[in-house]
Image (tube, rainbow, N blue to C red):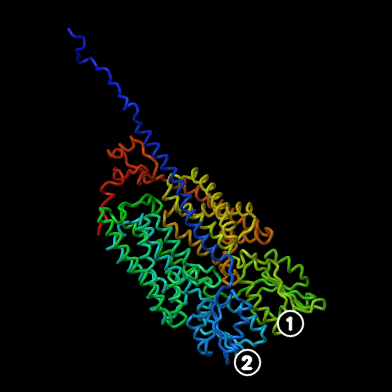
Amino acid sequence: MSNHTTGPGHQAPPRRKSRREEEAPDPQAVAAKRAKAEKIGRTAAVFIMPLLIVGMMIWGYLGAMHHQEARDMPVAIAAASTTEAEDFAAVLEQANGPAVEASIVGSEREARDEVYNRDASAAIYLDGKTAVLYTASGAGVSASSAVESVLTPVLLDEGLKISAEDVAPLPENDPSGMGAMFLATAMVTAGYMPWSLAFSNSPELLRRRRAFPLLAGWSVLMSALGALIAGPILGVLDGAQSLQVMGVLALGVFAVGAGQLLLTRLFGAMAVIPGMFLFMVLGQPASNLGMSIHVLPEFYTFLHQFLPMPALGEALRSVMYFNGDGAGIHLLILVGGAVAALLLTNVLDAVRTAKGKSPTPTEVNVAGLHGGPRPKRRAWRYITLGAIPLGMIGIMLAFMLGAMQSPAVRDMPVAVVGSTIEQAEQTVAGLEADMEGMFDFTALDDAGEAEALIREQELAGAFVLPSQENPQAVLYTAQASGNSAVQVLTTVFGQVAGAQQLPLDHQELAPLPEGDNVGMAAMYLGMGWIMAGFMVIIVGDTAAPHARRLKNLLPLVAGYSAFMSAVLYLIAGPFTGAVQGHFWSLWGTGMLAISAVAMFSTIFSRLMGMIAMLPILAVVMFLGVPASNASLSIYMVPEAFGWLHGILPMPAATEAIRSILYFDAAGLGTHLTTLAIWGLASLAVVMVLDQLKPVVDFLHPVPEEELAALKGGKHQPKAAEAAVLPNGVDAEAGQPAGTEREKEPLGV
């Protein structure tokens, strides 16, 4: 009888694992390792994406604009005799060789036309002892100011009496030419932003038969929004211009959008990087809108010939300030760019289809759109996709253009210094009668006290009356406090001294360094801190939802703030030369500013998801920039922005940088306190919100038993759990994300 028979109560010995099975990795260990690697990669993305976007923009703008010097400005010269014109051209070339490029024209009319047609920055007609100086402020206030500053001293040195004529003056409702600049900037943003968002949000819209008509409709909608805000609401446009401006704006949005569609085919989800670089980082300096291309590096003169933002800006200028003259070539550039981009998109799609590949992505890849999990209905995705750029453009135009369209001096603090208080007060009374509301005068009898108050930034300037010891008037200013205020003071008090036939000595108490000769460092470094602060939250919500919980978010924000503050210092300092020294002070202040804005952004992120971009940008950027006292003096914008100057983080960041760089940290404590209050108050609000609405980690692995319960319908998830869970499980449907329901065909 065999001993190896088996019965009901006998169990066979367990099978020994083969060597291959013993060496095979544990599936759970592999999954855990993969999850850890993904978590590290997602955390790294929180650093990398803001680094690329913020670093690229700040480096691009500071690199282009931190040092401005007139270069090759075309000047047309005419005179009664060719010899006289040639002699003056030689004098001009000798005095300002690199700054101007003089040419001789046959008549005064021809010289004037050169300026009107924007072939010359200025023209001079010599008639005996008189020189008629032609400029066109409609072609750019910066260009007119730059060329006048070069030509005027030479004309005066030649003993010529100057008669100035503006052949294309800016309208009263847009006296600084901000209308064309902000409309162009807004429409370029409207062109590239939606298609960058669509790649992850609604990729089905990127297919040609949907994208092309959507782009056309979007272009018309955005142009109507721009014309509505700039026209009836702000009064920058008059009724006769509105339809023409709408056409130009629509073409600009369409051309940029077509270009961005092409970039999505080439670069996928990263298309936002080359899009911003091409359309904004290169396009803004090359546009000739904010700054004349003749005071920037020569590279931007080349880019001005074909990039869409310069073409859109110059076409708008032609329509708004030159009755449409000269718009044709710029419109052709936009049309040609749009056609080329659409043709190349078709070619790429055909090639990929022939290879059996989808020309567009087939999966939605965005975590939260409205403060909760990924919505299952397309309507939410489409609403978000349209609401973010639509709201951003509307807010940008309303706040920034509304604040800066008509600069007017208001209550600028200035001291009048006399030998006695009585003399100073008497002069103040006379000046106030002539300049009602422009200046907030203080009467002093000590020039040293006035100097101290200027260095402490309590005064914008001081006008010192002549005395027996000093028979000439003296004007004290602080260029580092803001170039626009200095320009106002030198113009106004130069006229005051001239009317009284007093020689005027202008003494600069806080001059800007050569590497930042127009004061751009404080503005762009501060803007970099603010952008870095809100981008870590916007990017982190989608890239690294595991870091949303406060215990994870705080150390991440601390490390990120230290990292980005150091990077931005390197850009402003060694890389561009706009800033010298002061590393530790700027690094620490930058950390505080970045972390404060990050905490403020977290409040809206908790409540609104991606749509939080709108209120965040409205507060920290679109209100913050006009209130910052950077691009325009705080005494030249509406009074409300003067109040905001004392409380918003952008002004605090900008003024802190100025204090550190140029004023021996005077007043720095106040600005640091403002930033600290924003950070601490925001942190307190976030803590309260987290108690009321628990934070969901969209990518946290779900335990097997919980997954089984969900699939079997034995457990109804809490509202906070009803999300696309981190291991790809749809809590509501009980199936992995990426099933047929999520990957439905995206064809037309």
Check whether the beta carbons of the residues at disc 2 and disc 1 lie within 8 A of each other. Answer: no
- Residue 332 falls in which quadrant of the image? bottom left
Q: Which mark is residue 454?
A: none
Is 96 left or right of 31, judged from the image as shown?
A: right
Residue 515 is situated, as x and y percent measured from the top left of the image, at: 62, 63
The location of residue 588, given as percent across then percent down, is 61, 51
Q: Which of the two marks, 2 or 1, is nearer to us in this view?
A: 2
Question: Where is mark 2, residue-wise?
Answer: 128
- Dividing the picture into quadrants, the one containing residue 678 is bottom right
Q: Residue at x 52, y 63 (%)?
A: 61
Q: CA distance from mark 2 to mark 1?
A: 28 Å
- Amino acid type, label 2: Gly
Residue 134 visible (yes or no) = no
Q: Quadrant of the C terminus?
A: bottom left
Residue 502: mark:
1
Which residue lies at the image location 65% right of the left edge and 60% below the top edge? 661
